[in-house]
Amino acid sequence: MNKTGIIFDLDGVIVDTAKYHFLAWKHLADDLGFEFTETHNELLKGVSRVRSLEILLDIGNIKLSEEKKQEILISKNEDYLSYITKMGPEEILPGVTALLDTLDGLGIQYVLGSASKNATLILKKVNLFERFIGIVDGNSVFKAKPDPEVFLLGAKMLKLKPEKCIVFEDAIAGVEAANAANMISIGIGDKQTLHKADFNFKDLTEISSDFIKELSTIKEKKEQKVEKIENK
């Protein structure tokens, strides 16, 4: 099993910071004079901060200078930080600790692969920082999901080929990035929304140790299927 590595997204998989992003973006939209809903917020999941602002401005049909955009991004991040600096271990999502314990017991290493530039701070706040062997975040990548860069860097941290890695994601862009990297994608959340994932679970509490043990075999079968397609 130590030939398999895991890459976790942060928001919506390890902790739920989407609610804090929503509050910060909504505050910004209110200041700009238009409505920003939770439905709109779904469009920002797994997306970089800069791209999120572009989407938000498109929703409000607002044009701003690059200088103003940078000013707004700083303000939004300060607003968001005011929420996450108050986080604690109680905000770890159900099933996370048990799954990490299972992975540790099986000798499977794991890293974080997130668009968040605050990933390190958040993991420290919830006392999970020391458990991950590495972090790839918004400070490390140049291309946002669905580009696979974040996960490919995660594979390098794990010292594994991409095809040996499994990704846990709650966002469409993240699932697409994992698939583009030829990794096993596991969607956490709504199955219809994340239908492109190889496997789907409501949350991490549904993932058994038996499933984790079978992942290596599942991955080998997928690789063989890809090889057959490529050799046709």
Image: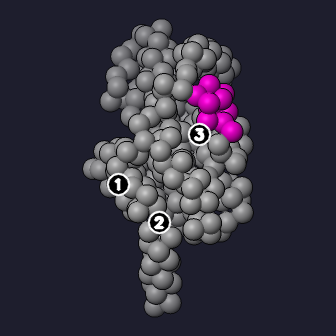
> Which residue sits at x=34%, y=49%?
206
> Viewer-proximal residue, 39 or 121?
121
> Viewer-proximal residue, 216 or 27?
216
Check disc 1 and report the residue beneath it.
Answer: 200
How many neighbours does mark 1 have within 10 angstroms: few (below 14), some (14-19), or many (20 or more)? many
Quadrant for residue 123, please give it: top right
> Which residue sits at x=45%, y=78%?
221
Q: Position of residue 97 (x, y in %)?
A: 50, 41
> Which residue sits at x=47%, y=44%?
98
Q: Helix, strand, or loop for circle 2? A: helix
Does 214 lie within the magenta span?
no
Q: Helix, strand, or loop for circle 1? A: strand
> Viewer-proximal residue, 57 or 141?
141
Q: Main secondary structure of the magenta part?
A: helix
Amino acid on which disc 3 is placed: Ala
How many neighbours does mark 2 have within 10 angstroms: few (below 14), some (14-19), or many (20 or more)? some
Amino acid on which disc 2 is placed: Lys
Point out the frontmost of discs 2 and 1. Answer: 2
- Residue 54 appears in the rendering: no
The number of numbered badges drawn on the structure is: 3
* Contact (Cβ within 8 Å) of mark 2 with mark 1: no
- Between the C-alphas of marks 3 and 2, the distance is 28 Å
Q: Helix, strand, or loop for circle 3? A: loop
Point out the frontmost of discs 1 and 3. Answer: 1
> Which residue sits at x=55%, y=20%?
87
The label number, if any, that marks residue 159 in the structure image: none
Residue bounds of the magenta highlight: 119-130
Q: Is residue 154 left or right of residue 27?
A: right
The label number, if any, that marks residue 213 in the structure image: 2
Check disc 3 and report the residue beneath it.
Answer: 115
- Between the C-alphas of marks 2 and 1, the distance is 17 Å
